[in-house]
Image (spheres, rainbow, N blue to C red):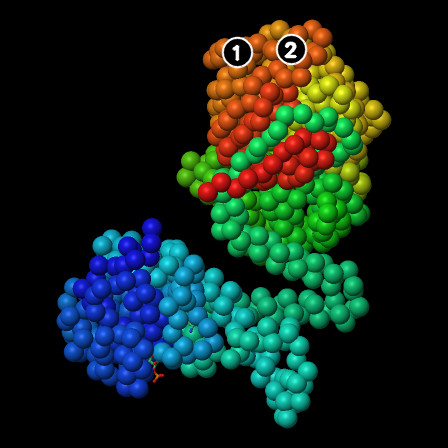
Amino acid sequence: MSEQSCAPTERGILIIGLGLIGGSLAAALKEAGFEGRIVACDRDADEVARGIDMGLIDAGSTELAPWVADSSLIVLAVPVLAMEAVLRELAPHLGDQVITDVGSTKGAIEAAVERVFGGMPPRFVPGHPIAGSEKSGVAASNPALYRRHKVILTPRADTDPDALARVRALWAACGAELLEMDVARHDQVLARTSHLPHLLAFSLVDTLARQDERLEIFRYAAGGFRDFTRIAGSDPVMWRDIFSANREAVLGALDEFEAGVARLRRAMTDNDGDAMLAVFDRASHARQYFDTLLNQTSYQAMEQRNIRYRVTPGGDVRGRIRVPGDKSISHRSIMLGALAEGVTEVHGFLEGEDSLATLQAFREMGVAIEGPHQGRVTIHGVGLHGLTAPAGPLYVGNSGTAMRLFAGLLAGQAFDTELTGDVSLNKRPMGRVADPLREMGAVIETAEGGRPPLTIRGGQALRGIRYDMPMASAQVKSCLLLAGLYAEGETRVREPAPTRDHTERMLNGFGYAVQRAADEAWLQGDGRLTASPIDVPSDISSAAFYLVAAAITPGSDLLLEHVGTNPTRIGVINILKAMGADLELLNPREVGGEPVADIRVRHAPLKGIDIPVDQVPLAIDEFPVLFIAAANAEGVTRLRGAEELRVKESDRIKAMADGLAILGVENTVHPDGIDIVGRADASDTHVAHYRGGHVDSLGDHRIAMAFAIAALRAESEIVIDDCANVATSFPGFVDLARRVGLALEEQEVS
Ligand code: NAP
């Protein structure tokens, strides 16, 4: 939508206080094509005159009364402590106008409004644009000031919805993003993110300037000083008002800051390099982490790009590659490394958003963590009882695994914590872990419907339980075992069907005994974890694409290094072997309790099989590419018992069936599976097995990668739409594909 079309429909807008903020609002509205009248009142006649000269306002004066009747919306843009006087002057002239303000603190303004009107009028919608500059006055007005900046509104339950909608429209027309929060939270958040930094900048510049009367040292001030103190050039009156109006919250933030400085001072006095490193490291990574969070707009923009793959047939699939690390093991390596005694070195860490969120959460609980740098992370473990209370809620992004595992290990801590995630995670039910944890004596509060955020009360004495899981869930099992580390006695979990056992294996790898027999795993509380180096195995789900690529391509010879071969994950290896693939597991070894091997794959003719039902759960993510193997086999491959495939990122059975049909590969879809008629003959000598074509991945990364591999044996080019998601799930897929010999081109389609 163009900004022109979102111009508000107000009859007229009155801006009281024509400075930087009020003037920029007028400028932005004019630029957005607002056709009503904009008038302003300011106690400085010159500012009004300048505003008219600049074409920002149509009229104005130092008097307020003449302009009220003809305006339908009034914006208060004076300094915070001037608001009350302005409101008193305004009150007798008001009709049904909508009123809003731009003040940087909200509690004090709300109190002023209540004093003047005897309550909050429903048509008053408090607001605060998070945009500005050190400059003041109308001359500094900038029509782009609010574009892509946030504006916080603090409406109440009884705020008139029409008034709220109109204030939203006002700011939306200026290109701003709107947020709503309550007044107290606004003042707390701003005290920390804006007011405290300004206070420190004012204080630092003032202190240094006094020490050096001739300001000699400022000549040597380098970029860092200039950046840090730039905001000390801001308007003194405005800031005096803000600190007075938000006194309590700023004092609270200042107390926290002083305690932090005192801790650093102590570390320096004691010459405690580790303590200093821990603080600097935490801060430096927090900064980078917040950058990635803040950049989410560009990240989402990237996701929305339509990336198309064009893959030309041919290629020989040779070489030696290592695909990215396993996500489940990356997560657990941080968790167990943090709780272990000693220093854990991790290699091959998957630097995905979710595992970075887990790293950050442990940093916030006092664990010094270096990296990640090119997959290397060093964790200075604090022991089972060494975590410290985080300053705020712990954020785990989109990771259900992280939230459920954290719930278990936080239930046993001495301090309270709050666990929260992104919008989609916050919709997922957590009752399946909260209920059994409560049985163990944990105190956990959830939002409505058992959903996050989870508030976990510390200092509870947990006791071991014997839990029969109603569903087969590795996350629930892991959660309870982690809580069991802190429980008295034995914690025992029974699973109705086998699930991934990374937690049990890795605990053993860290020297913590977990027993297993049949369908049960159990451990005794109150042991110790000992640091252990971890070279995170490559993710077998990512390796699967190259396994199939080499298996179907004559002349291929590919070595995949350091692939995780956990028995709960190797369905793809078992199925390919059953089809006749030439796969060799070389150099089998254990890393932190996890089995790993290098896998050598060479071409061999494949034959269609009935996929054993017991292998289906062990290969569930790998079926898209296994269907490509089936298309390149001789005879029919039949899959049953895979209804779960229909509720993944897409209905994978249907999406694959449609794509295969486009290539001319005959198939029949069943409710829980598919039959695929392979196109090879027994000798597998024909170069091409099916035609090329244009397929849609439906945004499903695994479908996109599977059809890229299919092109190796196509007659002509395969074009695949909607491939942007591949980059997030498997960073480096395209580069690795090219390295082993695929002719893959990426195109951005408008
Ligand atoms: P500014 O450039 O100094 O503008 C404020 C204007 O209001 C000045 O022209 C001032 O006149 C006038 N004024 C003061 N008291 C008045 C009264 N009783 N009646 C009529 N006019 C009066 O300040 P600003 O930066 O635009 O800030 C305005 C508001 O925006 C403040 O509440 C501030 O908290 C908020 N805000 C500022 C920023 C920022 O970065 N600047 C960001 C977000 C929100 P005099 O010059 O004669 O005093």
Residue corresponding to mark 1: 666
- Tell me residue 64's x, y (percent): 21, 79
Taking depth in this image into account, of 189 and 641 the one nearest to the observer is 641
Taking depth in this image into account, of 666 and 623 the one nearest to the observer is 666
Ranked by sequence position, the earlier of labels 1 and 2 is 1
User: Taking 655 as reference, is 44 above or below it?
Assistant: below
Going 65% across and 36% down the picture, which residue do you hit? 733
Q: Is 725 displayed left or right of 742 in the figure? A: left
Residue type indicated by callout 1: Glu
Residue corresponding to mark 2: 680
Query: Which image quarter: residue 62?
Result: bottom left
Going 71% across and 71% down the picture, which residue do you hit? 265
Taking depth in this image into account, of 116 and 222 the one nearest to the observer is 222
Ligand 1 lies in which image quarter?
A: bottom left
Going 58% across and 38% down the picture, which residue do you hit? 746
- Tell me residue 174's x, y (percent): 35, 62
